[in-house]
Image (cartoon, helix red, strand yellow):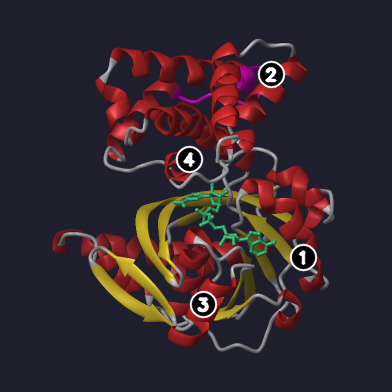
Amino acid sequence: MGGETTLGRTTSSPAPISFFPRLLGKVAPVQRFLVFFHQLMLLFAYGGMGDGMKTVIMGAGAMGSLFGGLLTLSGEDVWLVDIWKEHIDTIRSRGLTLEEKGKSEKVHVHATSEVASVGKADVVLFFVKTYQTEKAVSDALVLQKENTAFLTLQNGLGNEDAICKQVDRREVIMGVTGQGATLLGPGHIRHAGWGKTFIGELDGKITDRANQIARIFLQAGMETEVSSHIDHLIWEKLFINTGINALTALTGFRNGQLLNFPETLRLMESLVSEAVEVARKKGIPIEGNPVEKVRTVAEATRENRSSMGQDFDHKRRTEIDAINGALVREAERLGISVPCNQMVTDLIKTIEKRF
Ligand code: NAD
């Protein structure tokens, strides 16, 4: 898709190189020069500094506020849009409180509940829950001008279809992120994970606009790469969400506790193996051992409660339809049986009815 479109420019000032201190603060002194050099090379690879873009984030919950806060701190022109009035009012009156590694800072981010008041956007980034995407896309159409890019970093399957129903496929960029955040209250979030972000065009081309977006994320201290096979990475992340999220919701466990018992390990392995079978039949190449990778992620995030677990704890609707539920639908289409994913999907949806 998409040609080599360059995003339109806005009048905001160039972003300062404030990402160096952020990244360098996280490594031992002996490694600092290497990190500095690596980031400098990436920045050059993605086309240098400072051509301002206006980014509008639809959904300013945990992740939207994290990206909005970090991009604002690095000098980007960013607007947060959310239907949650109390949260937006708090950000407008007192700033966004961003907690990171025990420290807390206030970020003054543009925020509104009136998307029409924002004007036009160069990039629209979706960070609503998957079941809210269609409505958020229709609300965001007012932001569109020539060459507006619509990017999603949401989890699960189905976001591409939800966006492409209303926006030309050539304007859509997909992605996955290993960044993590927790919403602590109105106007208050905690940065909780620092994994890599990948973005990519639907047709796999490496375009100027994808490079520009990667560059502003990088400047904001978020390691980002443009991928020519973003669909494969979306499936890789789906394997992890499939193996961990529903199980932690149903059991009440933290991620790492799933590794402590033969029963949960067996369930995890069955859920992921079924997902791998579906992916293979779809022609997605499988790298390494996905079950082993899911175990590694559960170990690395041992103390975390998954987002679906947190949704259950707060008796909120989950994203099951975009994760295990989406796999069940894909499997049905391909004539494959995925009984374990069917079972956990039904269990989660049954329990949700009590909320
Ligand atoms: P969240 O529930 O904290 O935030 C979603 C926000 O969207 C809410 O504040 C809600 O009011 C808002 N919203 C709903 N409809 C809207 C609309 N029409 N217009 C504007 N705002 C609207 O969710 P989150 O944890 O930030 O997750 C967002 C997405 O990112 C999910 O798909 C999730 O799976 C994915 N994700 C989350 C994490 C994480 O650590 N939280 C990590 C990676 C990916």
Disc 1 residue type (three-letter): Asp
Please state which amino acid type lies under the numbered disc 3: Met
Residue situated in front as seen by the camera: 103 or 297: 103
Secondary element at image label 3: loop
Q: Position of residue 239 (x, y in %)?
A: 51, 29
Question: Along the polypeptide, which appears first: circle 3 or circle 4?
Answer: 3
Give the magenta range: 278-290
First along the sequence among labels 2 and 1: 1
Q: In the image shown, does 188 or 64 lie closer to the viewer?
A: 188
- 10 Å crowding of disc 2: few (<14), some (14-19), many (20+): many
Residue that carries the numbered disc 1 in the rendered image = 139
The residue at 15%/60% (across/down) is: 30
* Mark 2, secondary structure of its residue: helix
The disc at residue 331 is 2
* Cα–Cα span, label 3 and label 4: 38 Å
Q: Toward which corner of the image does residue 320 lie, by quadrant?
A: top right
Q: Position of residue 303 (x, y in %)?
A: 27, 41
Residue 156 sits in quarter: top right
Picture quarter with the C terminus: top right
Q: Are marks 3 and 2 in contact (CB under 8 Å)?
A: no
Q: From the viewer's side, name the closer residue of 218 and 180.
A: 180
The answer, for residue 232, to whether it is visible in the render is no
Question: Is 280 a magenta residue?
Answer: yes
Image side of residue 292 versus residue 231, left or right: left
Horizontal arrangement in the rendering, residue 168 relative to residue 208 (left or right): right
Q: CA distance from mark 1 to mark 3?
A: 31 Å
Which residue is under mark 3? 49
Residue 100 is situated, as x and y percent measured from the top left of the image, at: 30, 65
Residue that badge 4 annotates: 308
